Amino acid sequence: MAQRVEPSWRKPAGALAILAWIFVWIILIATGSRWVGGLHTLLQLPIYLVAGVVWILPLRPLMIWMETGRWRA
């Protein structure tokens, strides 16, 4: 018979941390949008493209922690 694995508290805690980080990132981008909005459209494009990708980089260690309980793989 297979062993029953108890669910970890790390996954719900990590999910809440991810939602909190997304909320903080949205606030940061919205705060900077006044300055960025004054730039030419072709200058805004790379800024928002980078901002749209960079937010996920800090989540890698969090995802590793959620799965393993350690911050590094």
Image: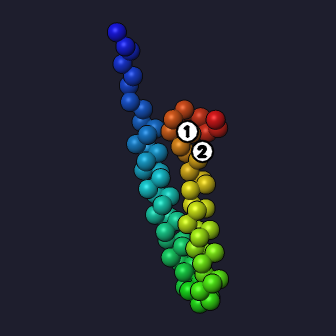
The amino acid beneath tag 1 is: Trp
Q: Is residue 47 left or right of residue 25?
A: right
Q: In the rendering, at what x and y percent does residue 21 appear? A: 50, 58
Secondary structure at numbered mark 1: helix
Q: Residue at x 39, y 22 (%)?
A: 5
Foreground pick, 38 / 12: 38
Graded by Cα atoms within 10 Å as few (under 14), some (14 to 19) or many (20 or more), the crowding at tag 1 reads some
Mark drawn on residue 49: none
Q: How many residues crowd around disc 2 within 10 Å: few (fewer than 14), some, or many (20 or more)?
A: few
Quick check: 21 left or right of 3?
right
Residue found at x 49% / y 71%: 27
x then y, percent, for residue 51: 59, 68
Tell me the quarter of the image containing the N terminus.
top left
What residue would you read off at disc 2? 61
Residue 56 position (above or below residue 35): above
Residue occupying the far top of the picture: 1
Q: Is residue 10 visible?
A: yes
Question: Which quadrant would residue 44 be assigned to in this image?
Answer: bottom right
Q: Are marks 1 and 2 in contact (CB under 8 Å)?
A: yes
In the image, taking residue 26 as reference, residue 71 lies left or right, namely: right
Point out residue 64 in the picture as x, y percentages from the top left corner. Answer: 56, 39
Residue where numbered disc 1 is placed: 65
Regarding residue 35, the answer to whether it shows in the image is: no
Q: Quadrant of the C terminus?
A: top right
Q: Position of residue 59 (x, y in %)?
A: 56, 51
In the rendered structure, the answer to whether residue 6 lies left or right of residue 24 reads left
Looking at the picture, which amino acid does disc 2 mark? Pro
Query: SS for tag 2?
Result: helix
